[in-house]
Image: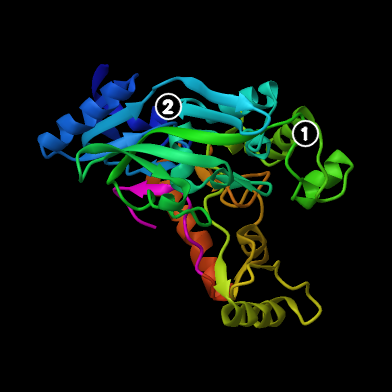
Amino acid sequence: MRELSDEPVAGHTTMRVGGPAARLVVVSTSDELVDAVREVDDADEPLLVLGGGSNLVLADEGFAGTVVKIETTGVEVDSADLCGGANVTVAAGEDWDGVVARAVAEGWSGVEALSGIPGSTGATPVQNVGAYGQEVSQTIARVRVWDRLQQQVRTLMTMDCRFGYRHSLFKGTDRYVVIDVMFQLVLQSLSQPVRYADLATQLGVAVGDRVPLEDAREAVLAQRRRRGMVLDAADHDTWSCGSFFTNPILSEEQFADLRERVAARLGADAPAPPAFPDGAGSVKSSAAWLIERAGFTKGFGLPGPAALSTKHTLAVTNRGSATTADVLALARTVRDGVQEAFGVTLVNEPVLVGDTL
């Protein structure tokens, strides 16, 4: 366990913004993680738990409490057979893309479409991380957590986690600290069915086909690199939290209103907004599509310190000298512009600490 004082949090996040933590404690084992959290709670001090920092935007004023940074490691294969698949328990601090790379190498199918996503494994169930037709909830068997309210370690099965689109029991609360996650993966050399049309086109297959795991991973990484979604210290398009806004979930009535607004703004012959009905009366649309049609192009905000990515309008980026205030000012401009144009209020995907959108 290491302890630092007045440590800038910006250096521990992918957006690279945020003020100092009064105290930052780095833990490398599960016992250290639980002990550190209990110590802060016993002292009745503010606590912020930090993983890979890929989904966090901290206020410029910093954090007047203790930040516990999780750097726990360990990947344990509990079982691996053709009947039951591979049950793999991963420590919260393990780099997520490293886990996906190992899964592909070992022939564990089920997370290959989640390649290139930055951050730690412990953060994946919180956000129910997903991309290219896969979500971690499809493979999570259980999540082991420290329950700060009950002061005990608890094991929550998939049904207990209340997974939804970019949501879970763990999101929006500081009650639970993820210790490790068990994934139940399929033992096979082929990917799960390819669900994303652009990915299928790149692979030269039909939607629903399977491809070798290595091919699926490389295709996903190529897609993400084109969008500036693979971390690269030399590329400011990757100094971000990935997608800053979630795709809006609308009722059928709200989506009908959106279509009318699109026609009024863009013309009766304009393409309708993307629609992905869930069969239960809700429709998911595309935040990126709305942002672009509201007039916010790639690179919007340049040459300022914060701008939309030059590769993808869904990413708010730090061009090298941005503050949290700069990032949030740009995000508010985009959110408010979409609201004014189409009546849809976009919701931020990263967690904001000490500030609001």
Q: Which callout, 2 or 1, points at the residue further toward the start of the chain?
A: 2
Residue 190: image tag: 1
- The residue at 61%/25% (across/down) is 80
Q: Assign a secondary structure to mark 2.
A: loop
Residue type at mark 2 is Gly
Q: Quadrant of residue 3?
A: top left
- Picture coordinates of residue 341 (x, y %)? 58, 74
The quadrant of the image that shows the C terminus is bottom left
Q: Position of residue 327 (x, y in %)?
A: 45, 47
Instruction: Give the SS element for disc 1.
Output: loop
Q: Is residue 127 left or right of residue 133?
A: left
- Which portion, as a residue range, is magenta? 345-357
Q: Quadrant of residue 205?
A: top right
Dot 2 crowding, Cα within 10 Å, few <14, some 14–19, many 20+: many
Q: Is residue 296 left or right of residue 270?
A: left
What distance separates the C-alpha of mark 2 from that of mark 1? 28 Å
